[in-house]
Every structure is written in C-alpha cells, then in structure tokens.
Image: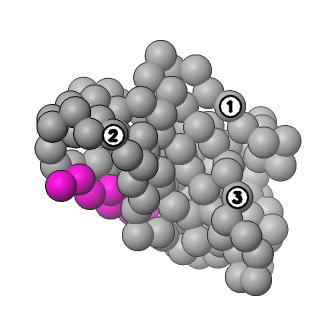
Amino acid sequence: QVQLVESGGGLVQPGESLRLSCAASGSIFSINSMAWYRQAPGKQREWVAIIISDGSTNYPDSVRGRFTISRDNAKNTVSLQMNSLKPEDTAVYYCNADIVQVSRSRRTYWGQGTQVTVSS
C-alpha cells in the first residue's frame, strides 16, 4: 500500500510565509505527477500547483508568483512554499500523487490534509 502524509500547516498572518511538505511511502515503483490541492469551507477542492517527473511545474493564476512547488525524487517528497499569503488562501491543503506501485498498478493517492489559516 501507499500513504501520503502532509505536514507544515498552521496559522499565519497576511503577508507571511508557510511551507508544506508531503512524503509518500509504501510499495512505490515510480511517481509521475505530484500536486497540491486546497479546499476552503463551503467551496469545491481546487488545484494549486503541480510538478511532473521531469520537474516542470504549473500553477493557477490565483497563486502563480507566490507559491512554489518542488519535489525530491530520491525521497518521494513534494513541498509547497507559500509566500505573501492572503486570507483567501485559508483552506485545508491536500497532497496528491500519481503513483505506480511495485506491482505496476497505477492510481492517484491523496493525503489526509493539513489546515492553513491566514488571519490577522
């Protein structure tokens, strides 16, 4: 089996920074894309950053220039550096990964989520 475990959430003031991390563990053969999503109260889950195996990244306009996603392929980890945080960034943040297991089966996994609150 495979698990994704996030860490790094918390309460910060507007304009401050926060770094989220996610570690994948288990019977992993390879990881294709890794991404971060978020879900604010009463809203649908939305994508905030993606990085694929070759290191290329993409972001929606709402976070581009403020958020940076990175990954360590050797450690099966992905991080999200969030700068210039705004109150509208408040949400539960989820790690997502497209994983091929040792058995060669492939599926998408989700972490349990970590709360990010931006408030003065």
Rounded to the nearest angstrom, the CA distance separating label 3 from label 2 is: 23 Å
Q: Quick one: quadrant of the N terminus?
A: bottom left
Compared with 81, 41 (above or below) is below
Asked if residue 90 shows in the view, the reply is: no
Q: Nearer the viewer, residue 17 or 73?
A: 73
| Disc on the earlier residue, 3 or 2 | 3
Boundaries of the magenta span:
1-8
Residue type at tag 3: Glu
| Disc on the earlier residue, 3 or 1 | 3
Q: In this view, does 68 lie to the left or right of 75?
A: right
Residue occupied by mark 3: 46
Check disc 2 and report its element: helix, strand or loop. Answer: strand
Residue occupied by mark 1: 58
Q: Residue 106 carries which label?
A: 2
**In this rendering, which labeled residue sits more in front, label 3 or label 2?**
2
Circle 3 crowding by C-alpha within 10 Å: few under 14, some 14–19, many from 20: some
Rounded to the nearest angstrom, the CA distance separating label 1 from label 2 is: 22 Å
Name the residue at 71% across, 74% down: 40
Residue 19, percent from left and from top: 51, 52
Q: In this view, does 29 lie to the left or right of 21?
A: left
Name the residue at 42% across, 49% down: 108
Residue 68, percent from left and from top: 62, 37
Compared with 100, 87 (above or below) is below
